[in-house]
Amino acid sequence: MLNFPITNRLFVFCTSLLIITLLPAKNVLSAKKVNHYRSQYKSALLADVESGRILFHDRMHQIIYPASLVKMMVSLIVLEEIDAGRISFQDSVKVSRWASKIGGHQVYLKQGEIFQLRELMKAIVISSANDASVAVAEHVSGRDKQFIKKMNKRAVELGMKKTRFFSVHGLPPGRGQKLDESTAFDMYLLAMELLKHPQYLRWSSTRLDSFRNGTFQLLNTNHRLIRNYRGMDGMKTGYHRRAGFNLVSTAEREGQRFISIIIGAKNSRLRSKSVTHLLDYGFNNFLKFELSKKEDTVPYFADVEGGEAEKVSLKSAETVRILLNAEELKRLEIWPQIPSKTRAPVAAEQQLGTLEYWLDGKMLKKVALHTEYAVPEQSILSKLTGMLTNLSEAN
């Protein structure tokens, strides 16, 4: 394979250089300045949802206490069970004595009451109701302890290596119980999976709703940012004294969505400021650069042996858009991986190598290269003509 960097990248950057000038001129933050609030929280993370790329992180693998963020896993399991057809939003859920006695933030469920599963899920996601979370867990698995096993099993499947759930609500543990544990990185993995379910964002973006046939108000625990930060539509808050103020949030503007995570802030005001600062860093510094279009030819050829042509031009098999800031765009490297020789015949649309997009030693994207046209095997007449030409040149 030919393996060499593109030293002159005009073919992909001729339009991108113009786009750099479109980067917002106001409030552009350097990576250092985004750390402004780092003394006010325990860990933080910012990620691009489309690619999953982490754009900023601070102590993201440090063990933290998620508090009510555990309800994100409760929600994920319920939504996956619904997708699998094992339960339904229309299911009737009967409140147990245990669920009715859970403290903290609640919707004051009474033993023996019956609610639709959909209503209880609204209470969990919008208002972080602990009693609703227990009732739902018992409906899915019979007992909340069995549901917790599901939570931990799913965490392992998602690669949440430092997460251990001991509750379905995230409250501080009683005597002999343990605190739920996780990390900002693990919460990012959970958030990415949860975003595959649009229904969750419909709940988490609801600032105000009602419960018990309109007699009980559900105010979103993230209502201030939902109201004040443009594009904010989720995802979950969490708090208890040992955990601090946590928020896994997501916002979308003009098709660009970020996940922002702040763990262990000192109060809700600093939590909101930190999240706003982090999301502003994303929206004000990063753009999606279109580096190649599907079917566009690239400035490379594949050498053909024994064909009617000695080379065949190549084209990109897909459109490549990568989220970058202006400095990263300058450091981006594009590496073609093309066979040194390909024996004829070569078919049209045949894959012959790839283009790899690298930033700071990490591959961001790989795209297949396809032949633009067919190259048939050299005919006998062409071979004889070539031989005669070579002989005449030698003489």
Image: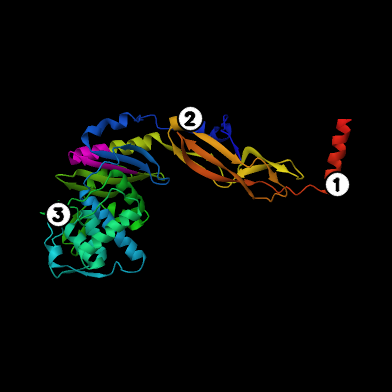
Disc 1 designates what residue? 381
User: For the point 19% across and 39% down, which residue is it?
Assistant: 269
Q: Position of residue 38 (x, y in %)?
A: 25, 33
Query: Looking at the picture, how far across and down is residue 164, in whole percent?
Result: 25, 52
Q: Is residue 269 above or below residue 82?
A: above
Q: From the image, which quarter does the C terminus lie in?
A: top right
Kind of residue indicated by mark 2: Lys
Q: Is residue 383 left or right of residue 374?
A: right
Front residue of 205/270: it is 270
Choose the circle earlier in sequence order: 1 or 2. Answer: 2
Q: Which mark is residue 330?
A: 2
- Disc 2 is placed on an element classified as helix
- Coloured how? rainbow
- Regarding residue 383, the answer to whether it shows in the image is yes
The residue carrying mark 3 is 177
Question: Which three-letter amino acid code belongs to the residue tagged 3?
Answer: Gln
Q: Could you tell me residue 14's position as x and y percent?
A: 55, 32
